[in-house]
Amino acid sequence: MAPAGRIPAVSLLLFVAVGGPVLIFLVALFDLWCIWRDKMTPGQFIEGWAHHHPFLAALLAGFVGAFGAHIFWHS
Amino acid sequence: MRSLLSRLGPRAAPPIALVLLSIVLVAAAWFRFRSAGTSACPTSFNAEAWPTGGFVAVLGAFLLGGLLGTVPHKRGNKGYGLLTQVGLFAAIAVITGAWWYETRALASDHTIQPITYYIMCIRFSENDWTLFVFILVALLAGRWLWHRPGAYLQ
């Protein structure tokens, strides 16, 4: 398999494998910081945005669904 | 320690659990894939006619995340911080960058592999682990995007 640019393909595989859990870690850690400071969390910000923009939120939710289907609707 | 936990309160339990869980997942992914190559990746995947159990689980997690919004919860009293806005801006920038890379890879006629190729390769190698990460992300996405306004604790 050809490497992507100057980054070896093995590193990209590791980067993608670690990337998902790292994103969850950052979001959860930031939530804790917001709770500590008694501020609203990013999730609550997005909830408010989704409440005021239901069509755009539905588009994004559809993208999440399509992404899940793309990855898991295979054997 | 007790004063720290009392200041955070019970609403900090889910993010604390997520922090601990994600540390375990990051370590597991690091040790599993640090020396793994793409030579074992399948060159093609067969699409199923009916929704697979994995897809149904991800979809179910999304819906469950939305329904969790109806559970009474507490809101912060001080509004949004500047760091929240910067964080969301950075998150959207990362998504945009990933999308740009995916488009570039798909247009390159396989000289560069798209991110989804690596995800499917990881899933092929560690299906349960990948499904678990996707369920967690779908739960968060459902909680945020499929907003079910519930009661707020005072």
Image (spheres, coloured by chain):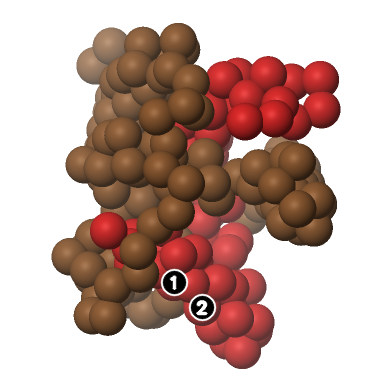
Left-right relation of B113 to A48 = right
Q: Residue at x 45, y 65 (%)?
A: A70
| Quadrant housing the C terminus of chain B | bottom left
**Helix, strand or loop for disc 1:** helix
Q: Residue at x 22, y 68 (%)?
A: B52
Q: Report crowding for label 1: few under 14, some 14 to 19, many 20 or more residues within 10 A (C-alpha).
A: some
Colour of the chain lettered B: brown
In the rendered structure, find residue A65 and report the number of the disc placed on it.
1
Report which quarter residue A1 is drawn in. Answer: top right
**Helix, strand or loop for disc 2:** helix
Q: Which residue is mark 2?
A: A62
Q: Is residue B42 above or below residue B38?
A: below
Q: Residue at x 58, y 64 (%)?
A: A46
- Of the pair B85 and B141, the residue shown nearer to us: B141
- Of the pair A68 and B69, the residue shown nearer to us: A68
> Residue B29 location, x and y as percent?
38, 22
Left-right relation of B32 to A16 = left
> Residue A34 location, x and y as percent?
53, 39
Please state which amino acid type lies under the numbered disc 2: Gly
Q: Residues at badges 2 and 1 in contact (C-beta under 8 Å)?
A: yes
- Of the pair A23 and B83, the residue shown nearer to us: A23
The count of marks equals: 2
In the image, the chain rendered in red is: A
Which chain does the numbered disc 1 sit on? A
**Rounded to the nearest whole Å, what is the CA distance between mark 2 and mark 1?**
5 Å
| Quadrant housing the N terminus of chain B | top left
> Does residue B151 appear anywhere in the picture?
no
Q: Is residue B87 above or below residue B108?
A: above
> Residue B98 location, x and y as percent?
71, 47
> Residue B124 location, x and y as percent?
32, 42
Please state which amino acid type lies under the numbered disc 1: Gly
